Amino acid sequence: MKKANEIDYGSIGFGYIQTPYNVRCYYRDGKWAEIETCTDENLSIHIAATSLHYGQECFEGLKAFRGVDGKVRLFRPTANAERMQRTAQYLQMAVPDTELFVKMCEMAVELNIDYVPPMESNGSMYLRPLLIGTGAQVGVKPANEYLLVIFATPVGPYFKGGMCGINVMVDREHDRAAPRGTGHIKVGGNYGASLISSVEAHNKGFDSVLYLDPREHKYIDECGAANFFAIRGNSYITPASRSILPSITNMSLKQLAADLGMEVEAREVEFSELTTFEEVGACGTAAVITPIASIYDPQTDIKYEYKWVGEKSQKLYDLYRGIQLGSAPDTHNWNMII
Ligand code: PLP
Ligand code: COI
């Protein structure tokens, strides 16, 4: 393992870098046990565990930042706890309560605090809470034992170049989720189902994939592992759909857009509206706000192009990042100081 001061935080991408500790909590005999601190990166798991066979697996992603005052801030952990609870309920897993989830996030940052990148590097500490069915089943049934583990890893930009316009391809061959399936929760299976699209898009030279609604392919759903937003005039427009993951970044941007006096439209967004937008982007914990430079539709061979970074996207980015770094007032109490 590299020492914290041996890492060149300004040049790392979005990958796994080992840190000293992860935190774990087991659910057995109908209750959550004490939180454990662990230095081992590996899990030992039963060969019949439901996470391996029947997809009883879900995860979260959130970040901690070193701010202008040197303090470390964890962004909206309660919102991630609530989303994991919704996912766990859907998958019939044990549901970690908010207090347990947030306490474990706090410990994961505190124990690895030296690995939170310096502010000037633009990096952050990414937390990955993972909930898995560990109990053995052979029939298709929920497990009776679970593990919640949270690891921490320093990360840089998700897309090379950071606040740089990405080129996106519409996928009309595969859907990441079904119309009444699991698109709205953060289950690992959604990501397995999306790999074919992203690998094919990358092989064709694109940075990411634009998914359409799985029922009609008439509306815009999501952009890779991030939500989609657009700016038209004074409006912040973002798809509302049963098959997209409710993004905590997007939820925050909707609030900030309203605070800035913009109209917020969360509604079905027709693909045909692409010609009317002035700025478009992808938003998420990993993607932050990534402007989209172009969207290519292989069906029509049309490439829709956008200016980046657009003025309104930049304004939202500055405010959002300012709150995370402690240079803008945290008016909605989103940060948890570690
Ligand atoms: N959509 C998908 C499919 C994602 O994987 C993510 C990442 O978590 C997002 C959207 C963005 O969500 P958030 O802003 O909560 O990270
Ligand atoms: C996130 O933004 O936290 C994600 O989960 C995206 C991806 C790395 C899975």
Image (cartoon, rainbow, N blue to C red):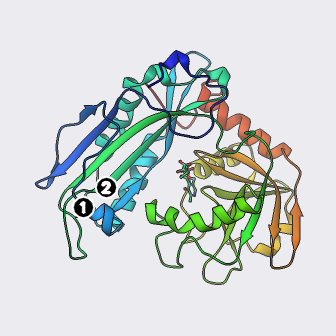
Q: Residue at x 34, y 60 (%)?
A: 88
Check disc 2 and give the amino acid type: Ile
Left or right of 265 on screen, residue 15? left
How packed mark 2 is, by other alpha carbons closer than 10 Å (few <14, some 14-19, many 20 or more), is many
Residue ID for mark 1: 49
Point out residue 181 in the picture as x, y percentages from the top left corner: 47, 75
Check disc 1 and give the amino acid type: Ala
Q: Observer-nearest residue: 180 or 158? A: 158
Rounded to the nearest whole Å, what is the CA distance between mark 1 and mark 2?
9 Å
Left or right of 89 on screen, residue 62? right
Left or right of 292 on screen, residue 245? left
Q: Is mark 2 within 8 Å of ligand 2?
A: no
Q: Which mark is residue 73?
A: none
Ligand 1 positioned in quadrant = bottom right
Q: Are dots 1 and 2 in contact, CB under 8 Å? A: yes
Asked whether the viewer can see residue 334, the reply is no
Q: Residue at x 81, y 45 (%)?
A: 312
Residue ID for mark 2: 132
Point out residue 25 in the picture as x, y percentages from the top left corner: 24, 42
Local SS, label 1: loop
Q: Quadrant of residue 151?
A: top left
Point out residue 277 in the picture as x, y percentages from the top left corner: 84, 61
Does residue 42 sit above or below 198 in this rendering?
above
